[in-house]
């Protein structure tokens, strides 16, 4: 509303600006949205639960996963009070193993997302901010990595590394090495947009150093899409780990991973489906919760993408 | 007569009296998350054949919404027309079936838009888009329609029309694109042409050419022309009469020379004073203070009062009716006489 | 148009070179003895190792070795298995299976994805739209690994044992096209979800476009406004997505083929990983990556056909 040019009586009650509680910034705005988003609340509870299980699987299991708890004589049993999810081919308790399998999924998912977010984000910031040859080189390299479908590339890397060296670290590496270019592209585009905003041009005109402009002015305004895509990628990483472990190049026994459990139960699946279905169910629930989280974060941070 | 079912509907004597297009007490509102926005509040105007009416106002004044309501291209919902009539040759088109309106829209009442680049479909050639009018509404063959498109492009003076008929919109300059929009709109000889800010996106020199073209086409075909604009300077040579809109209402309507000579509403006066003039060189340009009102939360009384330099206490409380000054003139200001005389301070 | 095609083809060359070099680097430059890496866990006889070093040009500089590798790819030589069989012969017959599977998946994806997406966009904000969005959320969350086994159990086994309907074979390709229905759908699930969302967004954006309003103002019937003016524009990103996805689906077929025991390239890849036949793994991955890149290239050219703005850039 305008500054009134009329005398004071014009300031009638209804002439006041429309009531619009505009939060101060993108972040507080997003946080406000998220707190009132049912999907976000449900997803957060689910993710917290999975994180808790992966941090302290021992608190959630019933008999533990030590080899001694497996009784070959009790193999492929159905659901019972002793074995909530039945037993697998080797007579191990499926429920306890599912609880312990959460760790690999959660750790691989989050670490891969953070690593690709940081690497891709940093390189994208440099490429977008400096432009010219920095941009040309980084973008070309990213394009090459981008051209390899991630599951194939990871499969290749892991089979060359060999099973003896396989583990969480190598799986994260194999997944992250082909996923960072996507983040780079997104960050680069966001930085280029932010770079031409008036306040950045103004800061530059006032003589702020490049480093300061990057960190203080561009980064806070370019990081939102990276967070959105990284959250959505979480689900892809978790699915990727399961696939690689299923194919035999990822997590190796005696470590426990849902993908590995599915692979182990596969041969007897049609007669004894439970040892496969339960890790499959938890795998899907975990992915569902992070995908929901990603959707909610996207809606909050970037309404245009909806 | 292109569509007898509409023309013969009212009694013949009534048709003779009724102007070509009458907008009568039109109200349009939008349902939004913040509440109901009353974008148009009782707008009335008439356009006769061969006459051009300029509808003037800032963005948000309801001038485009009125035009879209006439065309029937508002998205409903969220839009709603709770009251009012749009009579075309005596028939209230708001009451017609969607099918009957489809017979009027584009064929008898046509419209051109502000930004021709986005208003033309990027994936079809301009010839296809102009020819579509003939293929769909007249059942012409592809080839005949294409020839018609070339004719029309010639008529709106696009050079080398025959060579360019198969080009895509993005291959034309802004002015040429607007000519293509115009060619498409006049394709079926409409009786009313609505031009919604047709020159706003163009360079000043091109603006004048497009305006001249519109005026010429109108003279040739005796169309009724509604020119929607926020720029009083653009319409002076083309318009016969002017309706000034503010906050969803008409605040003044007059013949164009009357309003230029002596506006009867403080808002029209403000608009006129803010046109740069050669004889005022060196003086500070006038600007109306403040911003247009929030349609969700209109000021009581006269909607213009917070910005009005003449505001009196009763402006805050009483909504001014459209006072009739003469047969061709009206003003929605309690103090229009003082504004006209220049005695108000 | 011609210039665009040539420029795009030229742009593809560095990517092809870079990608093959990357694969080459992964195989030969990762820490460890490349001979040992190629041999997997078999013990390598020193004399054989020396022969292999010679054969694989391991004593030459890296760039020269890359040259040899590139020459092999161009001449269709993707290496030899330990049993001395050229990797290229492994592709015979298997390639067709994977292509059929990916094509089936693509058809499911196109029909279901575009259909649901259009439906959701036209019913925007109503319960149908919300239900479709929730459904896509579910599809994205269930990886092929899970949907494959579950559908195999439910449609392949339970349907047969409980209702006597043996329509969906559980494994193999003996039943012609029917063998591909279930695996094709499984392979398509995640893509269906993405395509549905993409279609929905794309059509919603187009429906808001000024030129759609123009078409309405021209008095075009609603069916024509939707079918010609809006759909034509919103299809552009969808066709390109589908085209690029064919390459991705072939690359992603490894899990599906393993679950349904389809004798395609993916299953061969799985077997070779299992048997630690690294040359075969490298060969197959190289071929699939090349297919993926070529599919993307074709799609870019297709884009120019569909969108005149790009053609005349």
Image (cartoon, helix red, strand yellow):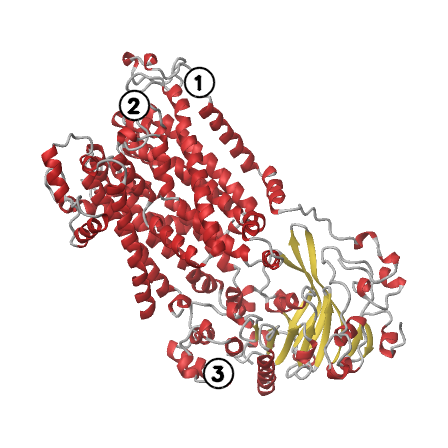
Give the crowd class for mark 2: few <14, some 14-19, many >=20 residues within 10 Å: many
Residue C6 visible in image:
yes
Q: Name the residue under label 3.
A: B158
Of circles 2 and 1, the one toward us is 1
In screen coordinates, is C91 left or right of B144? left
Residue C128 visible in image:
no
In screen coordinates, is A72 left or right of B289? left
- Seen from the viewer's position, the closer of residues A31 and A92 is A31
Q: Residue at x 49, y 63 (%)?
A: C222
Return the chain for callout 3. B
Give the crowd class for mark 1: few <14, some 14-19, many >=20 residues within 10 Å: some
- Seen from the viewer's position, the closer of residues C166 and B68 is B68
Distance CA(mark 3)–CA(mark 2): 76 Å
Q: In this view, does A140 lie above or below B59?
A: above
Of circles 1 and 3, the one toward us is 1
Q: Mark 2 points at which residue?
A: A272
Q: Is residue C240 above or below residue C283?
A: below
Q: Where is residue B321 in the image (x, y as percent from the top left)?
A: 82, 67
Secondary structure category for the residue under label 2: loop
- Seen from the viewer's position, the closer of residues A235 and A82 is A235
Give the crowd class for mark 3: few <14, some 14-19, many >=20 residues within 10 Å: many
Q: Indicate the quadrant where residue B275 lies.
A: bottom right
Q: Is residue A155 above or below residue A103?
A: below
């Amino acid at each position: 509303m305008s500054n009134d040019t009329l005398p004071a009586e014009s300031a009638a009650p209804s002439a006041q600006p429309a009531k619009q509680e505009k939060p101060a910034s993108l972040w507080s705005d997003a946080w406000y949205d998220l707190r009132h988003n049912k999907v976000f609340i449900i997803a957060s509870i689910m993710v917290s639960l999975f994180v808790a299980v992966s941090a302290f699987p021992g608190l959630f299991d019933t008999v533990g996963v030590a080899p001694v708890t497996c009784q070959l004589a009790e193999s492929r049993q159905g659901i019972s009070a002793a074995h909530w999810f039945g037993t697998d081919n080797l007579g191990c308790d499926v429920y306890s193993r599912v609880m312990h399998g959460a760790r690999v999924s959660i750790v691989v998912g989050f670490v891969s997302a953070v690593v690709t977010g940081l690497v891709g984000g940093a390189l994208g910031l440099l490429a977008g901010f400096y432009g010219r040859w920095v941009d040309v080189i980084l973008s070309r390299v990213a394009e090459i990595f981008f051209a390899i479908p991630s599951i194939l590339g990871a499969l290749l890397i892991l089979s060359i590394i060999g099973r003896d060296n396989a583990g969480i670290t190598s799986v994260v590496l194999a997944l992250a090495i082909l996923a960072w270019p996507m983040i780079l592209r997104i960050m680069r585009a966001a930085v280029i947009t932010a770079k031409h905003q008036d306040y950045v041009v103004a800061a530059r005109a006032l003589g702020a150093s490049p480093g300061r402009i990057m960190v203080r002015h561009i980064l806070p305004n370019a990081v939102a899409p990276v967070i959105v895509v990284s959250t959505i990628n979480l689900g892809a990483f978790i699915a990727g780990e399961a696939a690689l472990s299923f194919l035999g190049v990822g997590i190796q026994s005696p470590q426990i991973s849902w993908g590995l459990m599915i692979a182990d139960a596969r041969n007897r699946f049609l007669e004894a489906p439970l040892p496969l279905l339960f890790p499959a169910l938890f795998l899907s629930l975990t992915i569902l919760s992070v995908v929901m989280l990603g959707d909610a974060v996207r809606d909050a941070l970037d309404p245009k993408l909806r | 007569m292109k569509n007898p079912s509409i023309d013969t509907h009212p009694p013949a004597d009534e048709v003779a009296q009724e102007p070509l297009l009458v907008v009568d007490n039109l109200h349009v509102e939008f349902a939004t998350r913040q509440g109901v926005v009353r974008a148009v509040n009782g707008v009335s105007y008439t356009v006769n054949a061969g006459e051009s009416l300029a509808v003037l106002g800032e963005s948000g004044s309801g001038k485009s919404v009125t035009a879209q309501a006439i065309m029937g291209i508002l998205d409903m919902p969220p839009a709603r027309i709770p009251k009012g009539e749009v009579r075309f040759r005596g028939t209230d088109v708001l009451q017609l079936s969607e099918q009957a309106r489809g017979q009027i829209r584009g064929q008898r009442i046509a419209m051109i838009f502000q930004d021709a680049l986005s208003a033309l479909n990027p994936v079809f050639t301009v010839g296809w888009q102009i020819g579509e009018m003939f293929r769909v509404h007249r059942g012409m063959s592809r080839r005949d329609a294409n020839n018609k498109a070339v004719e029309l492009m010639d008529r709106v003076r696009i050079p080398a029309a025959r060579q360019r008929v198969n080009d895509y919109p993005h291959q034309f300059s802004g002015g040429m694109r607007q000519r293509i929009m115009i060619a498409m709109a006049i394709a079926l000889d409409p009786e009313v042409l609505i031009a919604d800010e047709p020159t706003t996106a163009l360079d000043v020199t091109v603006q004048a050419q497009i305006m001249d073209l519109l005026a010429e086409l109108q003279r040739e075909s005796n169309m009724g022309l509604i020119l929607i604009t926020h720029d009083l300077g653009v319409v002076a040579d083309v318009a016969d009469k002017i309706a000034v809109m503010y906050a969803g209402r008409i605040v003044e309507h007059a013949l164009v020379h009357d309003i230029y000579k002596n506006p009867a509403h403080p808002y029209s006066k403000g608009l006129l004073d803010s046109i740069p003039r050669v004889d005022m060189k060196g003086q500070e340009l006038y600007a109306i203070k403040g911003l247009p009102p929030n349609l969700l939360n209109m000021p009581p009384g006269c909607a213009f009062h917070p910005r009005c330099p003449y505001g009196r206490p009763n402006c805050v409380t009483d909504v001014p009716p459209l006072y009739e000054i003469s047969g061709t003139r009206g003003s929605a200001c309690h103090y229009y006489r003082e504004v006209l005389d220049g005695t108000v301070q | 148009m011609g210039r665009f095609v040539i420029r795009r083809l030229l742009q593809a060359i560095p990517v092809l070179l870079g990608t093959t070099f990357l694969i080459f680097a992964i195989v030969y430059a990762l820490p460890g003895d490349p001979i040992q890496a190629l041999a997997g866990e078999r013990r390598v006889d020193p004399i054989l190792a020396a022969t292999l070093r010679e054969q694989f040009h391991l004593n030459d500089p890296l760039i020269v070795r890359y040259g040899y590798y590139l020459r092999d790819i161009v001449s269709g030589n993707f290496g030899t298995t330990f049993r001395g069989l050229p990797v290229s012969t492994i592709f015979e017959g298997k390639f067709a299976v994977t292509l059929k599977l990916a094509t089936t998946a693509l058809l499911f994806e196109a029909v279901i994805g575009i259909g649901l997406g259009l439906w959701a966009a036209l019913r925007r904000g109503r319960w149908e739209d919300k239900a479709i969005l929730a459904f896509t959320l579910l599809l994205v969350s269930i990886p092929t690994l899970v949907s494959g086994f579950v559908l195999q159990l439910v449609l392949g086994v339970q349907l047969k044992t409980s209702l006597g309907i043996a329509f969906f074979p559980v494994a193999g390709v003996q039943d012609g096209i029917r063998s591909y229905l279930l695996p094709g759908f499984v392979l398509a699930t995640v893509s269906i979800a993405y395509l549905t969302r993409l279609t929905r967004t794309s059509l919603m954006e187009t429906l808001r476009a000024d030129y759609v309003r123009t078409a309405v103002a021209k008095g075009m019937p609603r069916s024509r406004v939707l079918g010609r003016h809006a759909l034509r524009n919103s299809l552009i990103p969808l066709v390109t997505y589908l085209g690029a996805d064919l390459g991705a689906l072939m690359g992603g077929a490894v899990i599906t083929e393993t679950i349904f025991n389809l004798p395609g390239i993916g299953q061969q890849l799985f077997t070779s990983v299992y048997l630690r036949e690294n040359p075969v793994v490298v060969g197959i991955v190289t071929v699939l990556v090349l297919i993926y890149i070529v599919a993307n290239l074709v799609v870019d050219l297709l884009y120019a056909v569909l969108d005149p703005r790009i053609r005349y850039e």
